[in-house]
Image (tube, rainbow, N blue to C red):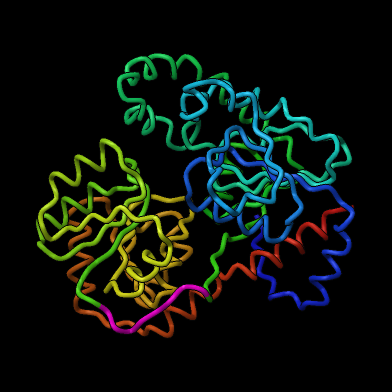
C-alpha cells in the first residue's frame, strides 16, 4: 500500500499532463447516478478534470441536475426496465451483466468510481483502466450479514432474505473476478486499501477524496447546538443520536436528505430538543456546519467526507473511533472520539467535549489538507506516471 503525498502541482506541470492526455478518449464509469452523495461529489471533480469524458452508468436519474447538461451519459439496459430502473438495489443480479455489456473499445483511459459493480467493465488490452474504490462492495463482503439483517426492500424483505444467501457465492466470485480487471486500484483511505487487499488481493494507492475547502464558510460565532447530516439508512446510526439526545436533552439539529420509513419513525420518537431538517441545499448545510458547536459522526465509514466539511467550517468533530474517521480527525486537536456505538459511550465523549476548547484556526488548517486541488493534481500525476 502506497499513500500519495504530493504537493500541489504547478500550473506548468498540470498543463503538461493535460496536454499529454488531450488526444485520449476518456470514460468515467459509475455504479449509478440516482441520489446525490459523496460519491457524486467525487464524480463532479473527475468531470472538472476531464470535461469531455463520457459517463457510463447502470441508471441515471439526475436529469434536472445542470452538472450533466453538457456530458454524454450512456446508461445500461436496466434504465429501460420499469420498477427496477428506479430501485437499483433490486437490480443487483443484473448489474454485473449491465457493466460487462458496455462497449468501451473506443476509449484510451477508463476510470471507475465505485463501491459496487462498475469496476467490472471490460476494456481493450491497451486501455489504461483505473478503479477509484470507495470500498469493496459492502453487501458482498465486509457488511454482508449487517445488510442481510437490515434489508431495505419493504414488503419484499422476506423474499430478499431468502434469495440473497442463495446468490451470494456467485456474486462474490464475480466481484472478485471483476476486481482483477483494472490495471490499478486507487483507494479512498488506508482503511479501504486494507479491505481491497483482504477481499480482492490487490495492492492499491491511497488518494483521499477532497472537497472545495475554500468555498466552505466558517465562523467562530458558534451557537448552542450539535449537528449531524446524511442519508437516513441504518448504518449511519441516526438512531444512536436520537436515543442519546432524547436522554440528555441537549439541542441537536439533524439534516436528513432521505425521507423513508426510518426517518419517519425517528422523527416521531424524537423529543423537542431534536430538530429534523429535510434540506439538500449545500449553502444551508454549510451554514449549519459553521454555526454548530460540534459535528457528531457516529457511523462506521470507509472514509467519510462530512467530518472534513465540518472541520473546514471551523467546527470540531465527535466521531466514532473506527475506520475512516481516524484518518480525518485528530484526537484532542480537531475533535474527539467515542469508543463504542452506544449511548453511554457517546454521552461520555459529549461530557468531555463540554469541558474542552479547540483552536478554530488549527481545525481549518487541517481541513485544507483535503482540498480538491490536491485530489486533482495527484490523480493527474498518477495517470501520467502509469499511462504508457
Check if residue 156 falls in the magenta segment.
no
Residue at x 76% of width, y 78% of height: 10
Residue at x 74% of width, y 35% of height: 181
Range of magenta residues: 215-222
Residue 10 falls left or right of residue 150: right
Q: Main secondary structure of the magenta part?
A: loop
Residue 220 falls left or right of residue 177: left
| Image quadrant in which the N terminus is located | bottom right
User: Is 286 above or below relative to 41?
Assistant: below
Check if residue 216 falls in the magenta segment.
yes
Residue at x 42% of width, y 36% of height: 143
Residue 85 in the image, given as x and y percentages of width and height: 52, 27
Front residue of 291 and 318: 291
Residue 261 in the image, given as x and y percentages of width and height: 26, 35
Residue at x 34% of width, y 41% of height: 233
The tally of labels here is: 0
User: Is 370 above or below relative to 255?
Assistant: below
Amino acid at each position: 500500500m502506497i499513500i500519495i503525498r504530493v504537493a500541489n502541482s504547478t500550473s506548468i506541470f498540470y498543463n503538461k499532463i493535460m496536454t499529454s492526455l488531450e488526444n485520449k478518449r476518456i470514460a468515467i464509469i459509475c455504479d449509478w447516478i440516482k441520489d446525490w452523495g459523496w460519491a457524486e461529489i467525487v464524480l463532479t471533480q473527475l468531470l472538472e478534470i476531464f470535461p469531455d469524458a463520457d459517463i457510463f452508468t447502470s441508471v441515471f436519474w439526475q436529469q434536472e441536475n445542470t452538472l450533466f447538461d453538457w456530458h454524454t451519459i450512456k446508461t445500461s439496459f436496466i434504465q429501460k426496465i420499469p420498477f427496477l430502473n428506479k430501485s437499483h438495489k433490486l437490480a443487483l443480479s443484473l448489474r454485473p451483466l449491465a457493466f460487462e455489456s458496455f462497449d468501451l473499445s473506443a476509449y484510451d483511459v477508463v476510470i471507475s468510481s465505485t463501491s459496487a459493480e462498475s469496476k467490472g467493465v471490460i476494456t481493450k488490452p491497451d486501455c489504461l483502466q483505473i478503479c477509484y474504490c470507495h470500498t469493496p462492495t459492502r453487501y458482498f463482503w465486509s457488511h454482508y450479514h449487517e445488510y442481510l439483517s437490515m434489508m431495505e426492500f419493504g414488503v419484499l424483505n422476506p423474499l430478499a432474505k431468502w434469495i440473497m444467501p442463495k446468490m451470494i457465492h456467485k456474486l462474490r466470485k464475480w466481484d472478485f473476478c471483476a476486481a482483477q480487471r483494472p490495471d490499478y486500484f486507487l483507494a479512498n483511505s488506508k482503511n479501504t486499501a486494507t479491505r481491497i487487499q483482504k477481499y480482492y488481493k490487490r495492492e492499491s494507492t491511497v488518494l483521499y477524496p477532497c472537497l472545495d475547502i475554500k468555498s466552505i464558510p466558517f465562523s467562530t460565532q458558534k451557537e448552542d447546538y450539535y449537528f449531524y447530516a446524511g442519508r437516513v439508512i441504518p448504518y449511519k446510526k441516526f438512531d444512536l443520536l436520537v436515543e442519546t439526545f432524547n436522554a440528555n436533552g441537549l439541542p441537536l439539529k439533524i439534516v436528513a436528505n432521505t425521507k423513508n420509513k426510518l426517518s419517519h419513525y425517528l422523527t416521531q420518537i424524537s423529543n423537542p430538543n431534536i430538530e429534523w431538517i429535510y434540506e439538500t441545499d449545500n449553502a444551508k448545510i454549510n451554514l449549519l456546519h459553521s454555526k454548530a458547536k460540534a459535528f457528531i459522526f457516529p457511523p462506521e465509514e470507509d472514509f467519510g467526507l462530512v467530518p472534513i466539511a465540518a472541520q473546514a467550517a471551523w467546527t470540531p468533530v465527535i466521531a466514532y473511533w473506527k475506520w475512516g474517521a481516524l484518518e480525518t480527525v485528530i484526537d484532542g486537536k480537531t475533535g474527539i472520539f467515542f469508543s463504542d456505538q452506544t449511548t453511554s459511550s457517546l454521552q461520555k465523549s459529549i461530557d468531555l467535549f463540554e469541558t474542552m476548547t479547540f483552536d478554530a484556526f488549527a481545525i481549518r488548517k487541517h481541513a485544507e489538507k483535503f482540498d480538491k486541488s490536491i485530489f486533482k493534481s495527484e490523480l493527474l500525476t498518477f495517470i501520467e506516471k502509469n499511462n504508457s
